[in-house]
């Protein structure tokens, strides 16, 4: 049980939604072209990255409660970056500063949505019983006493359709963006 995340999430054979999270990050680039792709991808994968880093101490990283905590933390960090880096470039002009603050707020909200999208996809996918018969849903709190999930990944058909489907659609949207940028610059 302690290694639930490890068992269900890490070896790719047990971790189908990895591609779907990637697809969401790729698609986001089309809608938010000013945010670097790596930031978008890290955001959608953040909960997995955290569960990998804190694998033993924090296996409940995928619980709804902790996912909300991760989301709010990511939003806060984004909002604080300008302060931490001590950006003051537009401080003299109040109007510009207000606009800039709103931009930061926008980015913070976008990142928050992407981080939380991880939990939503896992909620739709888990329990991934097609890959592991003893898999559970996503926990609400810190352990597997109460878990929820729609179980799309409980069949191979559902798992492949959703994981590949979301990835391919996301990749297509991203490629559309790349082509658009290229045709603009030429
Ligand atoms: Zn995950």
Image (cartoon, rainbow, N blue to C red):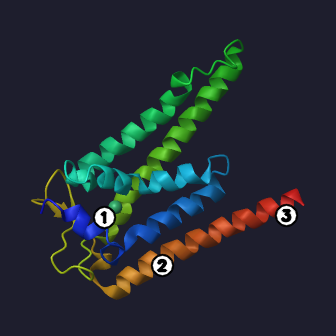
Label 3 – label 1 distance at C-alpha: 39 Å
SS for tag 1?
helix
Q: Nearer the viewer, residue 115 or 132?
A: 132
Q: Earlier in the sequence, mark 3 or mark 1?
A: 1
- The quarter of the rendered structure image containing the C terminus is bottom right
Q: Is residue 3 visible?
A: yes
On the image, numbered disc 3 is attached to which residue? 183
Q: Earlier in the sequence, mark 2 or mark 1?
A: 1
Q: Nearer the viewer, mark 3 or mark 1?
A: 3
Q: Is residue 56 left or right of residue 79?
A: left
In the rendering, at what x and y percent does residue 152 appear?
32, 77
Identify which residue is drawn at 85% across, 64% down. 183
On the image, numbered disc 1 is attached to which residue? 123
Q: Relative to 15, is 50 above or below?
A: above
Q: Is residue 147 left or right of residue 74?
A: left
Q: Are marks 2 and 1 in contact (CB under 8 Å)?
A: no
Q: Is residue 148 visible?
A: no
On the image, numbered disc 2 is attached to which residue? 164
Q: Relative to 43, is 148 above or below?
A: below
Q: Relative to 138, is 12 above or below?
A: below
Point out which mark residue 30 bears: none
Q: Are marks 3 and 1 in contact (CB under 8 Å)?
A: no
Label 3 – label 2 distance at C-alpha: 28 Å
Q: Earlier in the sequence, mark 3 or mark 2?
A: 2
SS for tag 3?
helix
| Residue count near mark 1 (Cα–Cα under 10 Å), binned few <14, some 14–19, many ≥20 | many
In the rendering, at what x and y percent does residue 99 appear?
66, 27
In the rendering, at what x and y percent does residue 17 appear?
38, 70
The residue most toward the bottom is 157
| Residue count near mark 2 (Cα–Cα under 10 Å), binned few <14, some 14–19, many ≥20 | some
In the rendering, at what x and y percent does residue 15 appear?
33, 72
């Amino acid at each position: 049980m302690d290694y639930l995340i490890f068992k269900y999430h890490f070896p790719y054979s047990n971790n189908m939604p990895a591609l779907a999270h990637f697809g969401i990050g790729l698609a986001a680039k089309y809608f938010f072209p000013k945010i670097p792709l790596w930031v978008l991808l890290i955001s959608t994968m953040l909960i997995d990255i955290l569960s990998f880093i804190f694998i033993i101490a924090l296996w409940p990283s995928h619980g709804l409660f902790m996912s909300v905590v991760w989301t709010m933390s990511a939003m806060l960090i984004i909002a604080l970056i300008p302060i931490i880096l001590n950006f003051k470039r537009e401080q003299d002009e109040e109007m510009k500063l207000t606009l800039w603050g709103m931009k930061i707020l926008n980015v913070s909200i976008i990142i928050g949505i992407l981080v939380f999208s991880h939990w939503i996809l896992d909620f739709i996918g888990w329990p991934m019983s097609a890959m592991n018969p003893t898999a559970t849903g996503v926990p609400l709190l810190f352990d597997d006493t109460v878990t929820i999930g729609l179980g799309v990944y409980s069949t191979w058909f559902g798992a492949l359709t959703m994981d590949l489907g979301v990835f391919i659609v996301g990749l297509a949207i991203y490629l559309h963006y790349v082509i658009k940028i290229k045709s603009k610059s030429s």
